[in-house]
Amino acid sequence: MAMAGHVDHGKTTLIKQLTGVDTDRLEEEKRRGLSISLGFAYRELCAGISVGFVDVPGHKNFINTMIAGVCSIDVALIVIAVDDGPMPQTFEHLDILRLLGVKDFVIVITKIDQADDFHQRSVVRLVKLSIPHFENLFLINSLKPDAGINLWKYLSAKAKTLPVKSEQGHFRLSIDRSFLIKGIGLIVTGTVSSGAVTIDEELRILPGSRRVRVKQIHAFDKNVNRARVGERCALNISGIKKSQVMRGDWLVGKSFGKGTPRFDARFTLLSSAPFPLKHRTNIKLYIGAKRQRALILFHDREKQGHKLSPGSTLLVRFISQSDLVCCRGDKFIVRDDSESFTLGGGVVLDPAVDSTKNLSVSRRTFLSEKDDQAPKTLLSALILNHKQVVSVKWFKTMCNLQTEEFQKILHSISKKNRLFKFSWIDEEYIVSKRQWECLERFIQDSLSLWHKNNPELSGMKECELRNNFQCRFDNASFESIVSHLVKANRIERCHGYVNLISFRRKLDISRNRNWLLIKNSLSVSSPQIAAFNDLCSELNIDNDIILDVLRKAVKEKRVYQFGTQRYILKDRLCELMVATRHLSEQESAFSITQIKRKLGLGRNSCIDLMEYFDSIGFTRRSKDRRSVVRPKYPDTLLEDS
């Protein structure tokens, strides 16, 4: 439970009345009479249940500390002094609490000894008008030690009705304090956001991934062997220096992933925001106890425009200056870059995003899903309803699931639905069996239509097919489906082209006719070895068809390609190799001028040919002369090349 409200409205005094603990820990707090750091107190309710109170600072200069203290709380007590009534910090705290997902509010009006009944009733009316949707309201005389009895009874009953939080996921704790105790070592404190931790467990500190070990755990004012989600605790850790731990760092389970500099979220700009928020504005972002400068980018700018009006909600992307630790469902607060105003807040939707700027249709659909869905419901919706291909690694990272937890969810879904699992680049993906078959048909139908429109060409460019596919699906699916269809002997993949096996057989006759025309053109003796552009100018055949036939001939080693798209028949190339060898027998090292005269070729063709001979190891260049170094029979050498 968190005590929130304006400075000097009696939050610390109220906690002392309820628990007997003075949460003003620092001498500076005592001297100034206000809380500038987080204070904590506990009171045991019954066996196994304790109530923890967080005393957050009310002064506007310490609002950052306040945000760190109210993460992961169940109930908020809004403390209002009767002599002041609701003040600016009261409403800012309320906004922050609501943005962080707190739904249970209790209003506590303090210092009633300083006002008569009429003034008290006036303040109560004002509170009811300005702060709607609270559960209960109490009036407390701060001077009476037993003034909080009725409030405690109410809070005790409330605590017993709160549901037990699930321990699902890796352990996470955002560090809000760290200090040294002589003879014990380094202590870090915070509230457990997910999972659980035990003594002697190995954890990591992010960012940096430094490994530490838990020596002791202190929760609810006593030493315990284990701390779980929702509990405020202090951990005695070893393996790291105090100077290496910063406020806002995260303690996480050793198998947890890493931080991310960007995430997609649903963001709400408060109705009380002093100005519209622009696309690509620098802001201060708060997640857990971390405060970080970040850039906010709007999705759907074609609908929303480049400005977000107060009271509006939008899908956005945050890009931070350094890595943040967050998971789907985590709440955050946004303040302006100078930290003068609370602008709004929201919920993390996907912390595992790449640098892609635009949203695909499938991603937009996913981000529109409810953020409070259980992982099983979300996974089922993505695979079965939205027919998406789901990366196992991405889903586990996003939802903070351990491997066994994910497998349990997957097993439950697969009992009633046929799923298909495939791998690509050491990463697993899940898709419904029906959707996998649809993706296969999409590839085959795309090729069939292309063959129909291009009957003279043997294959579609793979990059073109990939682009058509990725307009609707992801690259991993494309690679896996094409590989699967190749193994099933339904399509052929060769030198960057893809074709249906059935269509390749129909093309042979047409290709033979074109091949004869191209072969005749290559057979004509000329001082220049034919280049692709020469063939296109000479033959009345579509350029793509010429290239397609040459590609096939090169693959079958009937034609050899070298230089800037020069093509030569195998027999002609062998003749040139024999002539070059004869010259080498006469001249141990020969120049371009000598070989040019011997072969009867133009200079450019001769240079390209010699460089090709160098590349296959037939000749070796030394300055401006060459010699034959592998005088093997030309056929054998070409087969090896």
Image (cartoon, rainbow, N blue to C red):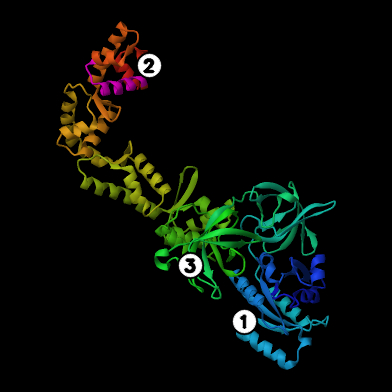
Distance, label 3 to label 1, CA atoms, is 25 Å
Distance, label 2 to label 3, CA atoms, is 66 Å
**Element class at badge 1:** loop
Q: Which residue is mark 2?
A: 620
- Mark before the other along the chain sequence, 1 or 2: 1
- Mark before the other along the chain sequence, 2 or 3: 3
Q: Residue at x 67, y 87 (%)?
A: 124
Q: Residues within 10 Å of mark 2 (few under 14, many from 20)?
A: some
**Mark 2: amino acid:** Arg
Q: Residue 18: where, in percent of width, then height? A: 78, 76
Q: Which residue is mark 1?
A: 131
**Element class at badge 3:** strand
Q: Residue 364: where, in percent of width, then height? A: 43, 61
Point out the image quarter for the N terminus.
bottom right
Examine the image and state in which quarter residue 17 appears. bottom right
The answer to whether 578 is drawn above or below residue 366 in the figure is above
Left or right: residue 502 versus residue 287 is left
Q: Residue at x 64, y 59 (%)?
A: 290
Q: Residue 330: where, in percent of width, then height? A: 58, 62
Tell which residue pokes out farthest to the bottom in this image. 118
Q: Residue 275: where, in percent of width, then height? A: 52, 72
Q: Which mark is residue 314?
A: 3
The answer to whether 597 is drawn above or below residue 198 in the figure is above
The answer to whether 589 is drawn above or below residue 544 in the figure is above
Q: Which residues are magenta?
A: 599-614
Distance, label 1 to label 2, CA atoms, is 88 Å
